[in-house]
Amino acid sequence: MELKAKADHRTLTLQLRGELDHHAAKRLVREIDLVVEREVPQQLVLDFSAVSFMDSSGIAVVMRAQRRMQELGGSATVIEVPPQARRVLHTAGIDRWVKIK
Amino acid sequence: MERENYIALQFPSCSVNEGFARIAVAGFAAQLDPTLEELGDIKTAVSEAVTNAIVHAYPEEIGRISIKAKRSGDVLEIKIQDWGQGIADIAQAKQPLFTTGGEERSGMGFTIMESFMDEMRVRSRPGKGTTVVLRKRIMPRMGKK
């Protein structure tokens, strides 16, 4: 799993590429924490367009990102979610807590 | 085309094997001619079961995980077994959002297995291990959406 960060004003966009499972999530949460700490954004956008597979580990990653952003007084949005990952997020009812576009 | 078939595989509980496990089962399931959505459901359910074994069955050690996948007609059955810690309270473990796995887990593994497959059965004995059996009927293509 690769992470590409792009900061624009107070919006930080993170593009995730590859398979988001428990193996990948262990490193990914640390990387997201680090870049969020560095950029201190108002808005965090998680771009899932290149996520080729996601299991419930992705739910934990999104929820943690949202919690971190709320601590900073901001919020997280998930965009461009492919059908398989969308089904996992939907089953978890995660759209009650995080905006999914 | 063979209507009855099976595979059996074993691997150590290293997280790098999560990807291998779901790809192997998806490769086996391909002979049932599943849709992309069905294949995604199977991969996701296998990933959840294997991750549970890695995180919860063997929290402090590397143990053995076994997967048996069987095809009987249109039905795919996947048995994921470990010989680890076992689950004391299966009903509690199945509750959405319940987890003992800390912040990197979501507590949605069993919920996803249950919703993505037609049937899920869990047998477990503390100290002996856990077996999860997942079943899904792959509808023949005719009349598929």
Image: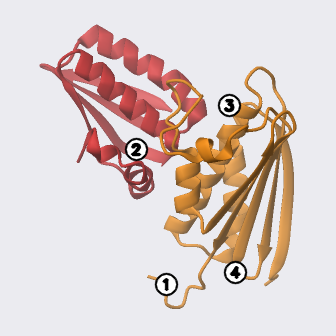
Chain colours: A red, B orange
Location of the N terminus of chain B (image quadrant):
bottom right
Seen as rendered, the residue at the extreme top is A38
Q: Nearer the viewer, residue B145 or B57?
A: B57
Of badges 1 and 3, nearer the viewer stands 3
Number of labels in the image equals 4
State which chain disc 1 sits on.
B
Disc assigned to residue B55 = 3
State which chain disc 3 sits on.
B
Amino acid under label 4?
Answer: Asp
State which chain disc 4 sits on.
B
Disc assigned to residue A50 = 2
Which quadrant of the view contains residue A9? top left
Q: Residue at x 59, y 49 (%)?
A: B110
Amino acid under label 1?
Answer: Lys
- To the question of a shared chain for discs 2 and 1, the answer is no
> A69 left or right of B124?
left
